[in-house]
Image (cartoon, coloured by chain):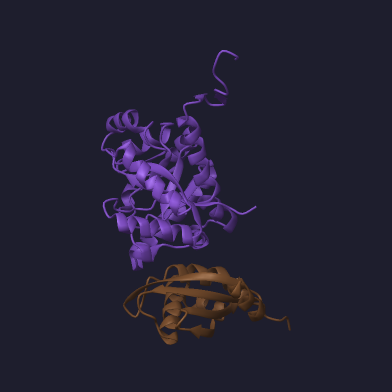
Chain colours: A purple, B brown
């Protein structure tokens, strides 16, 4: 069976509709079947629908995503309460240790992200991994910095990623590999993204999972939860009416 | 002596300006050396077999054990001669005949 590949982080400026169309078409051409573009929290249903239609024309599935950047755990909880049911994917950029811990233990968070350039603020340690494992959160790794950085900064990033990947694997935290790309020229094929994962210690089979099964699991799980027929995990409405 | 096993890789070059074959190979070697060092680069036995600047397709040969090294390095190439590029692996094959057959498909 042919694998379905996903890129859950295409960082496109939604105001530039031509570029959006070009990048969606290119993603489809490169072999992706599912993409997610982060929306601002204030986005309307119509705007999401418009982009969904564009993706459908390019023969590619689309998942709505929001990137939260809270400064305190309280702010994170507030955002989650307000936005969780509006988006299919919720990602949290953990810039402080307190936010990282809260995000890792909150079951409403799908993806944990850490700043690529500030190595002291990459808080994905053993404690974080244990919390993330319990709440079924995924660790998201963006590939863009590996393409754009050079020299000592890239070496340090690779070193951090290798340590975090090993921790994630030890505690059973699934990893999602995304591009985080905002330029067409930096877009890569799914297997090329997977090849880059070998630089931080992921074997070929695990690397392929990070761009196919893992992202699809998140989207499938959340679509089920957001469906009006969902009651509780494992329970959903099959039929309604007098004859039930 | 055991026969060295090789792989042929067809590359598609996505760029605004077409690089020359020398510029392309220089970029590949530079990236491999930066990432894996001179020792790693020496394991690849990399050779340019064919290059069609009009179609922007190149064929390179490498040792089978180094395919992943080469694939990773190719992914990291972002510029050739100051022009932005992306080098995509189109197909990989054990013989050059099968490679061209796959490319035609």
Residue A14 in percent (x, y) is at 29, 50
Residue B84, placed above or below residue A214? below
* Identity of the residue drawn at 37% across and 60% down: A22
**Which is more toward the observer, B45 or A21?**
A21
Q: How many marks?
A: 0
The residue sitting at the top extreme is A242
Quarter holding the C terminus of chain A?
top right
* Identity of the residue drawn at 35% across and 79% down: B17
**Which is more toward the observer, A241 or A127?**
A241
Residue B11 in percent (x, y) is at 51, 75
The quadrant where residue A58 appears: bottom left
- Left or right for B62, reference A157: right
* Identity of the residue drawn at 41% across and 36% down: A109
Residue A60 in percent (x, y) is at 47, 51
Note whether residue B102 is visible. yes
* Identity of the residue drawn at 43% across and 48% down: A140
- Left or right for A167, reference A122: right
**Which is more toward the observer, A71 or A128?**
A71
Residue A55, placed above or below residue B77? above
Note whether residue A93 is visible. no
Residue B70 in percent (x, y) is at 52, 72
């Amino acid at each position: 069976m042919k694998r379905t590949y996903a890129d859950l982080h295409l960082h496109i400026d939604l105001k530039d509709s031509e570029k959006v169309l070009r990048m969606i078409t290119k993603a489809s051409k490169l072999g992706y079947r599912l993409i997610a573009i982060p929306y601002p929290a204030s986005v309307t249903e119509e705007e999401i629908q418009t982009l969904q239609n564009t993706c459908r024309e390019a023969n590619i599935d689309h998942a709505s995503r929001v990137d939260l950047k809270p400064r305190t755990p309280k702010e994170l909880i507030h955002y989650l309460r307000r936005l969780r049911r509006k988006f299919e994917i919720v990602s949290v950029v953990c810039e402080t240790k307190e936010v990282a811990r809260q995000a890792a233990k909150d079951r409403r968070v799908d993806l944990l992200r850490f700043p690529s350039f500030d190595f002291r603020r990459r808080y994905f340690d053993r404690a974080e991994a244990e919390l993330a494992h319990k709440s079924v959160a995924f660790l998201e790794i963006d590939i863009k910095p590996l393409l754009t950085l050079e020299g000592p900064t890239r070496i340090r990033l690779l070193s951090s990623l290798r340590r975090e990947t090993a921790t994630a694997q030890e505690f059973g935290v699934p990893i999602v590999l995304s591009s985080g790309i905002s330029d067409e020229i930096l877009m890569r094929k799914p297997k090329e993204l997977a090849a880059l994962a070998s630089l931080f210690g992921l074997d070929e089979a695990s690397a392929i999972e990070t761009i196919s099964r893992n992202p699809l699991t998140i989207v499938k799980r959340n679509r089920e939860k957001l469906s009006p027929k969902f009651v509780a995990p494992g329970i959903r409405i099959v039929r309604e009416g007098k004859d039930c | 002596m055991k026969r060295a096993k090789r792989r042929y890789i067809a590359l598609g070059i996505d760029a605004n300006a077409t690089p020359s074959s020398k510029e392309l190979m220089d970029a590949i070697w530079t990236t491999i050396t930066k990432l894996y060092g001179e020792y790693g680069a020496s394991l690849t036995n990399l050779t340019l077999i064919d290059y069609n600047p009009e179609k922007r397709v190149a064929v390179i040969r490498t040792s089978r054990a180094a395919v992943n090294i080469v694939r990773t390095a190719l992914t990291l190439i972002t510029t050739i001669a100051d022009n932005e590029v992306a080098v995509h692996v189109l197909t990989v094959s054990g013989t050059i005949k099968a490679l061209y057959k796959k490319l035609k498909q």
